[in-house]
Image (cartoon, rainbow, N blue to C red):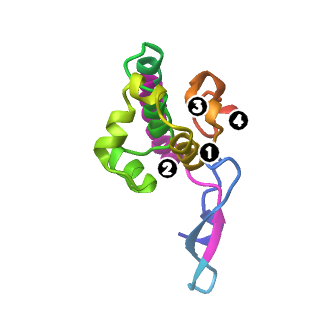
Amino acid sequence: MLKENVPQDGGIAEGLKEVTYAVDSDGRYELVPSLGWEPKNISNHQAWEVIVAEVERVRQQVVAGRLSPLAYHMTRNLMDISLLASYMGIFRWRVKRHFKPKVFKKLKPPILERYAALFRISIEQLQDIAKVDEMKIPGQDRK
């Protein structure tokens, strides 16, 4: 692709540029900044729609009392149980156990602090998902 033809279709990156290779007038490859291109923006947008729908599904389960807020924060941060357990340095079965609302309510402050620090939120936000901003698809505000 010629340097002049590198697409500059703004999308999900919200103004951030990515670097792509393009050919200059002498036929040499060069790094060129790009805002993205439409097919990539569409596929990224569709992927984020799936992620936001999954986060909403888990949020509904938390609101219904079937899961603890920890499951919501894990899903919102695009983690699975293995990854969360690994970051926390605890066994997976313990993380799974913390998904039970009754168990989560009895967690001691040091464990809550570690979870909150991992998700970069306060303990109050960790315990009450209503105190967390709604998850949105990146770049959605610009359309």
Q: Residue at x 40, y 28 (%)?
A: 103
Tag 2 near tag 1, CB within 8 Å: yes
SS class of the residue under badge 1?
A: loop
The magenta stretch is: 31-58
* Residue 123, quarter of the rendered image: top right
SS class of the residue under badge 3?
A: loop
Residue 117 horizontal side relative to residue 141, left or right: left
Outermost residue to the top: 64
Image position, residue 55 (x, y; %): 46, 30
Image position, residue 81 (x, y; %): 35, 44
**Mark 1 / mark 3, whichever is N-terminal:** 1
Q: Which residue bears the numbered disc 3?
A: 135
Q: Which residue bears the numbered disc 2?
A: 40
Amino acid carrying label 4: it is Arg
Amino acid carrying label 3: it is Met
- Number of numbered discs visible in the structure rendering: 4
SS class of the residue under badge 2?
A: helix
Numbered label attached to residue 11: 1
Amino acid carrying label 2: it is Lys
Tag 4 near tag 3, CB within 8 Å: no
Amino acid carrying label 1: it is Gly
Q: Nearer the viewer, mark 3 or mark 2?
A: 3
Numbered label attached to residue 142: 4
Assess disc 1: are there few (<14), some (14-19) or many (≥20) residues with their C-alpha within 10 Å of its C-alpha. Answer: many
Q: Report, in whole angstroms, how far the alpha carbon at label 4 lies from the one at label 1.
A: 8 Å
Confirm whether residue 129 shows in the render: yes
Q: Report, in whole angstroms, how far the alpha carbon at label 1 lies from the one at label 3.
A: 17 Å
Q: Is residue 40 magenta?
A: yes
**59 or 18, which is in the foreground?**
59
**Mark 3 / mark 2, whichever is N-terminal:** 2
**Mark 4 / mark 3, whichever is N-terminal:** 3
Q: Nearer the viewer, mark 4 or mark 3?
A: 3
